[in-house]
Amino acid sequence: MNRSSWFLALSLALAPSLAAYAAPPRVTNGLVGEWHLDLSGNTAYDTSGYARNGTVLGGTASSWGWLGTSADLSGGKYVEVPNSSNLNFGTGSFTLAAWIRMAAPTSSGVKTLIENRGGGSGRGYAFGVDQGRNVLLQLNDGTTWANYVSDGSLTMSPNRWHHIAAVVNRSSAPYTISFYIDGRRATTQPSPMLANIDNTALPFQIGGHMSIPSYRFNDRADEVLVYNRALPADASGGLGDIMAPGRTTYQPTYWNDGSTRQRNNNCYNYANARATNTFAQPGRAAGSMYSSITCAAVHAAAVRDGLEPVADTLINASSYKNIAALVVGPNYDYHWYRRDANNKWTHKPGGTAATNRDNSGNEITDPRTANRGAYTDFCGFFRVWSDSIEGSGHEQIN
């Protein structure tokens, strides 16, 4: 059972635990700005080595995040960083990257995540999201400006973590701007502006805008990174290294401790590879749980938590995410399975032990054909942000 024990678990632990996440390898070559946004009061520390620490303006911003805590910049809050030569690239190449989660991304035409333009001419660069779906970069040389936008082949969704990046190569032909969403190339455009784009007048901002308050980011941001070179997409030391959390492996001893962790984490915890010790329920973290034990109701609740539905035909498509599957015994209970890095399926029934076997004792190669017992209805697959460290997944469940 995955429902009946959550009342007890809730009394034991009211909030998700903070685990030791598998932080992606730290790429330091060309790193000139690194804000994890694990705020100390209103200070956002820069750990790049340049110590360009920022100050949160507009109120308290510390909240849950992609990796530990993050900055919730809703209500017009932003982080101001002193103007610095290391954050200006002249005529050179650079990379901007961050994790973001937008509550209602279509509510604003422009949501500025990084603002580094200044003076009356607006010389510099700005990076953010356009229409809640596409990645946007503006370059301004003080005389002219140009906007570059991803082509819509990959888009973003509300209430879901996304990694966005802009990689600008102005150092060697062919000169290009490449946009990435969740580690996948969204588009590459030729002929970026090659003139000097140094901002020597105004501070660097995370979530702010130099002149239009409604263009501030106004949502959740984490792990903001700036490089003074164009990072490669897949090679060592590239974008895959700075954003990929890794895939799960079958590690039953982590969950099967015969004590608190086993009793207070269920199939939903296990499928998301996140131990909260709250017997997590679909939709509870989002403030709206399922209203009935049906595929439609539980599926919708998981989507509210940020899980991404995916068609059966796309579960093997290239992605940095893990795959989970939902089944239901109508009016009885729901259950979740997850696919590990070896492409085999495992699960954890309620407060019992994690296992790689189905009800017939067979290894699970496909939850659609496994013996699932009373869970007769197959409801679909999801992509989830898990983690190579067991129990440390990144979806916001509770």
Image (cartoon, rainbow, N blue to C red):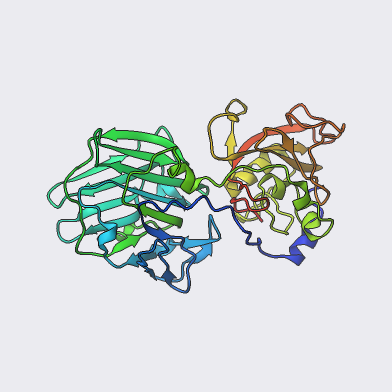
Residue 316, x across and y down, in percent: 59, 29
Say whether residue 262 is left or right of residue 168. Answer: right
- What residue is shown at x 48% (from left), y 72% (from top)? 40
Is residue 291 visible from the viewing direction of this image? no
Query: Could you say which is closer to the camera, residue 133 or residue 94?
Result: 94
Residue 141, above or below 80: above
Q: Position of residue 80 (x, y in %)?
A: 34, 66
Placement of the C terminus among the 4 image quadrants: bottom right
Taking 240 as reference, is 347 left or right? right
Residue at (30, 59) in percent of width and height: 209
Rendered residue at 32%/50% (across/down): 127
Q: Residue furthest bottom?
A: 41
At x 15%, y 60%, the residue is: 120
| 174 vs 196: above or below | above
Name the residue furthest right: 360
Q: Position of residue 168 (x, y in %)?
A: 30, 43
Residue 99, position as x, y percentages in the image? 46, 51
Of 73 and 66, nearer the camera is: 66
90 left or right of 220?
left
In the image, farthest residue toward the left: 143
Q: Nearer the viewer, residue 283 or 386?
A: 386
